[in-house]
């Protein structure tokens, strides 16, 4: 146990200072567009990816030797990549369904969702293919089955805080799910990330979770933001019901063997969730605190009024730890931030690592004082830089203030945990 705790500590040190340490627990993240691996050698390893417009869906193999991910190339085509060091390999995966993550099977193969060509204008009967491929340059994909899904989603936001939050968590905070379990393939059913089903790859039967809600449910109402329990028998998820002025999200636990659902009462509207190693659940909360425009001078506000940028939320964020058996909960973190992005408990169960998207104070100040022209920032990179994603660690047993890990590290992922 002492060796594991020391490995976690050294992991955090190298992320901050990029010292040469062999930590024994793989870690990856993206900073300034560069994907970097930690804990797989004596030094941090920057991956020499080809020119691209973005990287998503970082996931470690079960043994921690390889990292799979999706790369959008210069032609905006999605490529499935795998690497164990500085040189990545592009796999011959074919067309990939946008938005879905990739995942590894227990025997080290990569599972992903392939897209099909649309046959005519009707999108109501679209099916996506479930495929797997070995993480080797010469490998060819194998189709395992397919499932029906709703496609044709769109939308966006002018706020870079939303861009960074959605990059961390999926569009609107609703990431798409793809997870192999002992009970079937757990997957999203709609491109907006709301709706879950369990697919039997042997029979092709696809069971919608909470099917009694399917026929009469409203558009974009259903389960989302799924997290598989450490033992693989349960899923924590949020039931999302869209209402005015904000969606209502309810925490629930789904038993995968029976698909029975137990609602967990929470004091606040949960946002993102993850499991602890002891069966507790962590969930984040976003709460409006201030309008960041209020801190500007009258002259700066007058300039902003010309662009109709006068209401920019400055949020407070919280992380709760709840025991689903009795709904007893405690707040283990609160801070000034736009949103909590990703959360993961380390393999030894000792620490929670999470990403926090900054509020947009610096962004709105730069617009107001003339140092940022959003029209000239065609790629959005200058605006993203003013809304950094920071990483923190909380030692769960001792509690206390969180420790900063990195000031600019997005899409972190830790090997050895779900």
Image (spheres, rainbow, N blue to C red):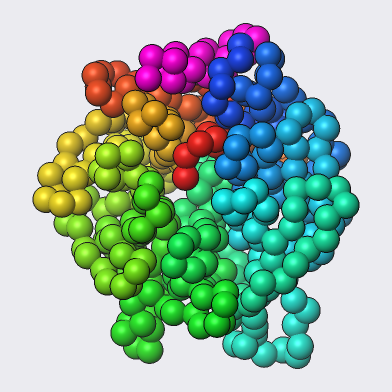
On the image, the x and y values in percent for residue 127 come to 64, 80
In magenta segment, residue 370? no
On the image, the x and y values in percent for residue 32 come to 69, 28
On the image, the x and y values in percent for residue 277 come to 33, 39
Residue 36 seen in this snapshot = yes
Query: Residue at point 75% right, 37% down?
Result: 83
Relative to the observer, which residue lies in front, 406 or 353?
353
Give the vertical position of 371 relative to 274 (above or below). above
Query: Residue at point 69% right, 15% down?
Result: 43
Residue 356 seen in this snapshot = no
Q: Residue 218 is drawn in which quadrant? A: bottom left
Relative to the observer, which residue lies in front, 35 or 64?
64
Quadrant of the drawing holding the N terminus: top left
In magenta segment, residue 18? yes
In the picture as drawn, the residue positioned furthest to the front comes out as 107
Magenta span: chief secondary structure? helix
* Residue 142 placement, left or right of 345: right
Query: Residue at point 60% right, 67% down?
Result: 154
Relative to the observer, which residue lies in front, 170 or 117?
117
Relative to the observer, which residue lies in front, 367 or 9?
9
Query: Residue at point 65% right, 58% down?
Result: 111
Magenta-tinted stretch: 1-20
Give the vertical position of 137 relative to 84 (above or below). below
All told, the count of numbered labels is: 0
Give the vertical position of 135 relative to 43 (above or below). below
On the image, the x and y values in percent for residue 89 come to 83, 42
């Amino acid at each position: 146990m002492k060796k594991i705790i020391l490995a976690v500590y050294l992991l955090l040190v190298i992320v901050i200072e990029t010292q040469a340490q062999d930590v024994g627990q793989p870690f990856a993240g993206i900073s300034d567009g560069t994907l970097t691996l930690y804990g797989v050698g004596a030094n941090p390893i920057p991956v020499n990816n080809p020119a691209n417009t973005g990287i998503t869906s970082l996931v470690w193999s079960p043994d921690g030797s390889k990292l799979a991910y999706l790369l959008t190339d210069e032609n905006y085509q999605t490529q499935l990549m795998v690497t164990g060091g500085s040189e990545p390999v592009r796999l011959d995966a074919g067309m990939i369904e946008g938005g879905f993550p990739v995942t590894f099977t227990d025997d080290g193969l990569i599972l992903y969702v392939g897209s099909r060509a649309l046959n005519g204008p009707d999108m109501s009967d679209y099916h996506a293919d479930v495929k797997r491929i070995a993480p080797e340059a010469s490998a060819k994909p194998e189709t395992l089955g397919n499932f029906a899904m709703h496609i044709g989603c769109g939308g966006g936001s002018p706020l870079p805080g939303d861009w960074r939050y959605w990059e961390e968590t999926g569009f609107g905070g609703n990431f798409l799910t793809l997870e192999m379990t002992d009970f079937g393939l757990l997957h999203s059913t709609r491109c907006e990330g709301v709706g879950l089903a369990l697919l039997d790859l042997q029979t092709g039967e696809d069971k919608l979770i909470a099917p009694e809600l399917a026929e009469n449910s409203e558009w974009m109402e259903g389960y989302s933001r799924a997290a598989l329990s450490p033992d693989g028998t349960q899923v924590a998820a949020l039931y999302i019901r869209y209402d005015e002025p904000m969606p209502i999200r309810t925490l629930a636990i789904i038993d995968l063997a029976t698909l029975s659902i137990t609602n967990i009462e929470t004091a606040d509207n949960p946002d993102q969730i993850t499991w602890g190693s002891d069966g507790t659940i962590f969930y984040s909360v976003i709460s409006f605190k201030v309008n960041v425009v209020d801190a500007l001078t009258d002259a700066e506000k007058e300039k902003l009024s010309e662009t109709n940028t006068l209401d920019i939320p400055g949020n407070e964020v919280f992380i709760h730890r709840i025991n689903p058996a009795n709904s007893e909960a405690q707040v283990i973190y609160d801070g000034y931030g736009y949103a909590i992005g990703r959360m993961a408990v380390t393999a030894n169960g000792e620490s929670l690592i999470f990403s926090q998207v900054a509020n947009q104070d610096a962004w709105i100040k730069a617009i107001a004082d003339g140092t940022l022209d959003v029209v000239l920032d065609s790629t959005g990179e200058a605006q993203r830089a003013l809304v950094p994603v920071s990483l923190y660690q909380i030692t769960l047993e001792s509690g206390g203030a969180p420790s900063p890990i990195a000031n600019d590290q997005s899409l972190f992922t830790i090997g050895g945990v779900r």
